[in-house]
Image (tube, grey):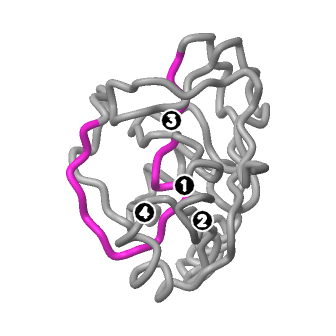
Amino acid sequence: MIPFSYRSPKTEVRESKIHGRGLFATADIAKDEVVAVKGGHIISREQLREKITPRFGPVEIQIDDNLFIAPVTEEEREGSMLYSNHSCDANIGMRGEITFVAMRDVRAGEELTHDWVTTDDDDYSVECNCGAPNCRKILTGRDWQRPELQKRYAGYFSAYLADKIARQAMLDR
């Protein structure tokens, strides 16, 4: 089976201290270099909650308020996974809706992590175990609204969240 998602040949999946398996750099990766591209089927929030998450766990990337990209069969699951764990001190962010790029130069051996704030707009609150010095301890699906995180990740939010941030800034003027 051809994988749905792309992972740079400069990466490999292996055991992670953050959670289960993670994505690691096997060679240096330059700032703004493509690290991964998420693939799958476009599904609704309802499909995600009722059919996908109960069967496969968190396997999706949000691309709009009510649209996600995810595998829909067990056979597709492994080929769609990026294995980028969450970190409050992330080193990869978004370009567009499905492309992950390095936010800084990354050294070989580093785990490649993204902050869910750059991709998620949802109703959840979970305890964070990333271990970063700046760990927020509690992650929510609305963290993208926090001004300090908007500043930290400027230029690396998914396109749909960047649009929401821009619209909110216009209303606040």
The kind of secondary structure element at disc 2 is loop
Mark 3 residue crowding within 10 angstroms, few (<14) / some (14–19) / many (20+): many
Of residue 118 and residue 100, the one placed in the foreground of this image is 100
Residue 47, position as x, y percentages in the image: 50, 85
Q: Nearer the viewer, mark 1 or mark 4?
A: 4
At 43% from the left edge and 33% from the top edge, which residue is drawn? Answer: 21
Q: Amino acid at mark 4?
A: Phe
Report the disc number at residue 56.
4
Q: Is residue 7 above or below residue 144?
A: above
Q: Residue at x 62, y 44 (%)?
A: 93
Q: Which mark is residue 71?
A: 2
Residue type beneath disc 3 = Thr
- Horizontal and vertical percent position of residue 133: 29, 26
Is 44 situated left or right of 127 in this image?
right
- Of the numbered discs in the image, which one, if any, rests on residue 118? 1
Write the start and end of the magenta stretch as one range.
110-129
Mark 3 lies on a secondary structure that is strand
Residue 100 visible in the picture: yes
Badge 2: residue crowd in 10 Å (few <14, some 14–19, many ≥20): many
Q: CA distance from mark 1 to mark 3?
A: 11 Å
Q: What is the CA distance from the residue labelled 1 to the residue labelled 4?
A: 22 Å
Give the crowd class for mark 1: few <14, some 14-19, many >=20 residues within 10 Å: many
Q: Which residue is mark 3?
A: 113
Q: In the picture, residue 76 is in which quadrant?
A: bottom right
The disc, 3 or 2, on the residue closer to the chain's N-terminal end is: 2
Q: For mark 1, give the secondary structure.
A: helix
Magenta stretch: includes residue 77:
no
Kind of residue indicated by mark 2: Pro
Along the polypeptide, which appears first: circle 2 or circle 1?
2
